[in-house]
Amino acid sequence: MMAYVKRIRLKSVLVVQNINSGEEWTLTEDLTHDQQETWAIFGVYPNFAWTPDSKNIIFYAKGKIKKIELSSLVISDIPFKVTSTQTIQESLHFPKQVFSAEFTSKMIRQLTTSPDGKFVVFNAAGFLYKKELPNGTPERVTNGIDFEFEPDISPDGKFVIYTTWSDEFKGSIKRADLKSGKTIPLTDEKGLYYSPSYSTKGDKIVYRKGVGNDVLGYAYGRGTGIFTMSADGTAKTLISENGIKPQFNKDDTRIFFQGNEDGKKAFKSVDLNGGNPRTHYTSTYVTQFCPSPDGKWMAFTELFNVYITPMVTTGSPLELSSTNKSIPLTRVTKDAGTYLHWSNDGSKLLWTLGPQYFSREIKNTFNFVDGAPQTIPPPDSIGVSIGLRLKTDVPDGITALKGARIITMKGDEVIEEGTIIIDHNKVVAVGKASEVSIPQNAKVIDVTGKTIMPGIIDVHAHLRTSPDGISPQQDWSYLANLAFGVTTSHDPSSNTEMVFSQSEMIRSGRMVGPRLYSTGSILYGADGDFKVVINSLDDALSHLRRLKAVGAFSVKSYNQPRRDQRQQILEAARLLKMEVVPEGGSTFFTNMNMISDGHTGIEHSIPVAPVYKDVVSFWNNTKVAYTPTLIVSYGSQWGENYWYDRTNVWENERLMAFTPRPIIDSRSRRRTTSEYGDYGHIEVSKAVKQIADGGTKVNLGAHGQIQGLGAHWELWMLVQGGMTPLQAIRSATLNGASYLGMDKEIGSLENGKLADLVIMDANPLDDIRNSEKIKYVMVNGRIYDSLSMNEIGGREKLRGKLWFEMGKGMVYSFPTGNAETWTFTTPNCE
């Protein structure tokens, strides 16, 4: 006889089979739901066993250990009681400042140094700035309105070339006079341009033309590759149809670029006609190759740190790696380095980390170089501060929202016929309309009959970023979220440089979107050029410092295989006052030790439902929060499938206004369906409610499955599990603010808090599905019409067109061919 568990429709059943005859029959259908959906790393059902006499089977079901007698099918409980004492660590929660009138730009990108070493030019918050070294105040290079990227300074130091982006006019390469600021275009056709770089003599420029993507659009993404042109923009020549990051060699006879070979990244070159190709280096983990201008040295980044080695040319490719002991090699960064480049004479390597500018002389790197000191100094921990201060965007004037029902989130308070007064970006009065005096100079918006609640805070949001480093002027995923009332997004896995740069662009008013926070790239324990190797507290501190330097206050611990590695991350975060939001991973026992070890919260649902006193009382006795992301519910069919099945998603007017049609149509119009009981996310949501009832704070996280609307699906699914609409709204607002350490400034509508709110045409307390019936949304005091995302109120401003609204230029075909667009691989957050 053989016993096993299988699924029969909605039930997990215990079955026995006569191995000789193949006959089988069901012993009991009263089992706990098995783990077939999502994945089951540790098996689909708890272990069970025969008694030695083969007359009984001992098994687990619904919180109890049971025995079934095969001859009679009588089931009896085996009583047991466990008294358990658990040691828990204090969970990581630190207060964060949301608003300040000014802020220091931390995500300094694409910095390059002048040939004489006296100034630098860099990108920050979408534009180019110039800073005189060491103590000059950064100033804009131009007064253009197009975004500006990837500067390169001419050999004589008089000009800078760079790429631009306009949603309407697409990209170009321009040249600016660094003295007058006067600009001229060098390219004569629209496109997506990258990495312009001068030749050593300054008479030529090499650049890349790339394909599009779903952030920038696909139009003008043809005719791609690496090109050269004269410094005045004439005589354009195709050099290679693939490759990224092109640059001239020291005598301008060849073009270096980064490509691929045999599954690895490769540093290659061709002559100026695109012939005589050579592969100089290959590497598994290197993300930037940077040869010195004198051809003597190769600097490279590997797993976030920077190394220098003598540049060796042989007949066959060399493997470039920090573990290569056959040639001299020195690590020159303490924590990390980005945007490597050399001084003009090749004697010094230069790079940035966040708002700090670093340098390292070759003579201080190798003891065999002339002029080297007796003892090689350690890497610097402090560089030159860039010191760019930007003003936070704040609206002018006073706005009064008069006559609405107000769900304040101050306890269970609901004000009927209330008024809110906003001065600039802060709530200065909230109460009954009869008790609130409206200033004479206020812009009054009559919202009688409508309902106002705090803006939604999505603490597990994945928002797209362009893979090539170009930011759109209007980002459809940001607008979609804001249109659906999401006023704060925390992205626990994103491209580090893009998400923090665009966060600063939103903050300074250069883009429109929710308040944006992120962990940046996750602390990934598996293999890849983004993996994070942690075997000590010092390792963990180094990785957290590099992320904090660019603007992170939280990190995501993801697939670190050993518990002690996760604990080292936690201790580093405790020392640096950062939060740690771990990947749940659908592994119940790992979830439980994550709670015990003091993580800020658990991201994604635990895969077990229902839960019992052991889990509930354990969790409730900590301050570890819970973001179940029911939209991708573990241990069941994902919750999003329910809404694709039960609603006509493609008919949602607001969604379709801010999302490319192919993304929605491909998921929704030819949809799969399930019987209602097969949607197990509802049982998972009931378990979430059990945990919340004991005092654990539950947050809303929509996982970026469908931008904007997904936050409402998540909200509705919390109610499906038994939460009241008010409880679910608290999870979507104040709880999320508390999770991020921001509840003193956002999350409720109270005097002195920031004006982030949603104005609905119907009352979500009557029916939670009314939450998406949004008329207006306000973020930081600016109010928008949610169907158009035009700004109204104190400033009337039409938004620009998104790439898929451009009419004649609208292209939906996806790019084909060998054009490389991804600079380096990125992990996916499950």
Image (cartoon, helix red, strand yellow):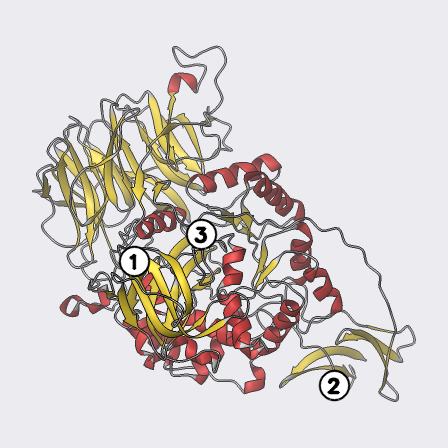
Residue linked to disc 2: 22
Q: What element carries label 2?
A: loop
Residue depicted at x 26% and y 54%: 396
- Residue 370 % position (x, y): 38, 11
Residue depicted at x 28% and y 70%: 445
Asked whether 267 or 162 is in front, the reply is: 162
- Residue 574 % position (x, y): 59, 42
Asked whether 187 or 694 is in front, the reply is: 694
- Residue 522 % position (x, y): 49, 50
CA distance for labels 3 and 2: 55 Å
Q: Earlier along the polypeptide chain: callout 1 or callout 2?
A: 2
Asked whether 124 or 330 is in front, the reply is: 124
* Of the two numbered discs 1 and 2 in the rendering, the one whose residue sits closer to the viewer: 1
What amino acid is labelled 3 in the image? Ser
Residue linked to disc 3: 518
Residue 236 visible in this rendered orientation of the protein = yes
CA distance for labels 1 and 2: 65 Å
CA distance for labels 3 and 1: 17 Å
Number of marks in picture: 3
Is 16 located above or below residue 169 in the figure?
Answer: below
Residue depicted at x 26% and y 57%: 397
Residue linked to disc 1: 512
- Residue 719 % position (x, y): 54, 77
* Of the two numbered discs 3 and 1 in the rendering, the one whose residue sits closer to the viewer: 1
